[in-house]
Amino acid sequence: MSELVKESWQKYLMQLQTYPLRTKAITAGVLMGSSNLVAQKISGAKKIQLKKCLLFMLYGFAYSGPFGHFLHKVMDAIFRGKKADKRTVAKKVLLEQLTTSPWNNFFFMMYYGLVVEGSPWLLVTNKVRNDYPKVQLTAWKFWPLVGWINYQYVPLQFRVLFHSLVASLWAIFLNLKARSIAAKKP
């Protein structure tokens, strides 16, 4: 078994080196689809809604993976030549939290409402207007630590993988929050 894992990891690393964008997109897609599957199971769904899992895979593949790939390239370019000290890491985390974090949470909530749930525009915008501040404040309590670990300890080629792993847990949280809100409605 150990050899199989080792060989699979080596093949993954080769794909990551040869086709970084594609590999990160596929990885994010698989992780996002899995996160929705886990969220459905945790919330007690009697029957797995495969369509939702596939829509989450699409989100990871088409948006989350590529966005992370280019985000880390841009961050690396912005801070090129800077000493990789705690001050620089703090600046990266702050920049990420003030720019991409609000956008990503807004985009995810809109995507979830409009595409995954298929809710009407007005309902989704009202829901986002009501829930977004709490979600973003929660994100600012959680994601800076993830960003710090990512920029301080994770090599550039693995940052999207690390972020995608944590984002799949975050997506479970957002899924469960959305489901609990939907369940409270009469």
Image (cartoon, helix red, strand yellow):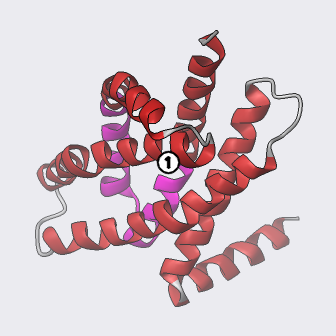
Q: Is residue 71 above or below residue 176?
A: below
Asked whether the viewer can see residue 28, the reply is: no
Percent x, y for residue 63? 47, 63
Q: Is residue 172 above or below residue 10?
A: above
For the C terminus, which image quadrant? top right
Of the pair 88 and 26, the residue shown nearer to us: 26
Percent x, y for residue 52? 70, 47
Residue for badge 1: 111
Query: Would residue 52 be found to the left or right of residue 178 on screen?
Result: right
Of the pair 28 and 11, the residue shown nearer to us: 28
Of the pair 152 and 25, the residue shown nearer to us: 25
Pointer 1 local density, CA inside 10 Å: few below 14, some 14–19, many at least 20: some
Image-quadrant location for residue 59: bottom right
Percent x, y for residue 50? 80, 49
Is residue 156 highlighted in magenta? Answer: yes
Query: Would residue 113 be found to the left or right of residue 157 on screen?
Result: right
* Range of residues picked out in magenta: 139-167
Element carrying mark 1? helix
Q: What residue is drawn where x is 88% and y is 65%?
A: 1
Residue at the bottom extreme of this rendering: 18
